[in-house]
Amino acid sequence: MSFTILPRSAWTDTAPGFARFPSRRLDPNVVRTVAPHYPADGPVTYGPEPTLAQSAARLRAYRNYHVNHLGWADIGYPMAVDQAGRIFTCAGLSFAGAHSASPSFADANYRVTAVLFILGNNERPSAKAIAAFRNLCRWMKDNRYPNLATRPVDHGNLRGASTSCAGPEIRRLIPTGGMDIPAGKVTAPAATATGDRAHTVKAGETLSAIAAQYSVSVGTLATANNLANPNLLQVGQKLTIPGGETAKPSAPKPSAPADSYADKTSWPERPIQQRLNDQLWEDNAYDNTKFALVEALRRAGYGTESVTPWGRLQQISRWLRGRHGMRGPETQVEIWKRFQTFLKSVDRYAGAIDGIPGPQTTRGIFGWLNDIRPAYL
Ligand SMILES: [Zn+2]
């Protein structure tokens, strides 16, 4: 009995993104819920047997959308399963992902882990996908999040959520217990692509030594081989070494921006600063920044081209501080990055409509900003 958790490298060569933000490191004990998601790709049918290449391409597309459109640090989902029963490591399980937070459940991504079903909107999850999901949940409970509740809660039923995710089929299935974390041993999904290896136990070997030899966790090894007592190994016993392993994600390269704010420990208001940084990456984070920009422009009586981008940035910062009590260099850096990205997207939008750059376009941008300003600002 074994199943494979494909590593992140199965679908992307990008580095995990949330690891750049130390405050996003999860406390495994507070993760108590697993939430299935679906991608809301619309009325498409992906079919029962996607190839690895097809599923990998979809994950890359979701990551691209999350990073380049929503402005998140990485694909929002920690893990994913496809209809063929493959299990993918996406953003991974060490850091809080994105996608589950709402205004009334702002730390949802810290308390709820998420598994994406790569499905069309009305596609029914296959038996293999459900088996993969349940195996993964069992594995997470045994190896990562000991307090996971047995019954998942789909995204739309999380507190404060307003979404049809994870779709009607999963939502129908959950109350039946059909997606519960299985008790005891997990069952293997049929015919997953594996890179499994075999090991024959030699005299004097311990499970932990074997695990270390293959860079897998003891828990994974015990689970994969259905070992009730990991201390009882017999010479000559054959062990399956799972090929794709997520227990030891390759050490994320430290990619903190090389700026003068690297020394965060000297910061007196770190909790506030953390809150803002975290908030900026949450579901609504990009929008919050966008709304903040709109609000800053509105209050500044925008439309006057004499307001420089830097001036607007300062307006945003002042507004954020005034409203949220947030301040600090990290915050400024983040806001500035957001602002630049946002302006580029606005430029592209306005340029496509007007066909000409310049003051007219700029006025168009301001008009558009006003149009998207939510009523509550
Ligand atoms: Zn969702």
Image (cartoon, rainbow, N blue to C red):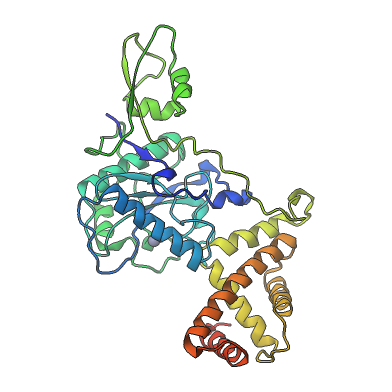
Which of the 4 image quarters holds residue 227?
top left
Point out the residue furthest to the front here.
356
Residue 296 vs residue 232, the one in the foreground:
296
Q: Quadrant of the C terminus?
A: bottom right
Q: Is residue 209 left or right of residue 298?
A: left
Q: Quadrant of ligand 1?
A: bottom left
Give the image location of residue 285, x and y in percent. 55, 67
Which residue: 48% across, 44% down? 93
Which of the 4 image quarters holds residue 191?
top left
Give the image location of residue 46, x and y in percent. 24, 59
Which residue: 68% across, 91% down? 301
Which residue: 20% across, 52% down? 48
Q: Is residue 202 left or right of residue 132?
A: right
Residue 5 vs residue 145, the one in the foreground:
5
Q: Is residue 153 visible?
A: no
Give the image location of residue 212, x and y in percent. 48, 23
Residue 376 sits above or below residue 89 on the image: below
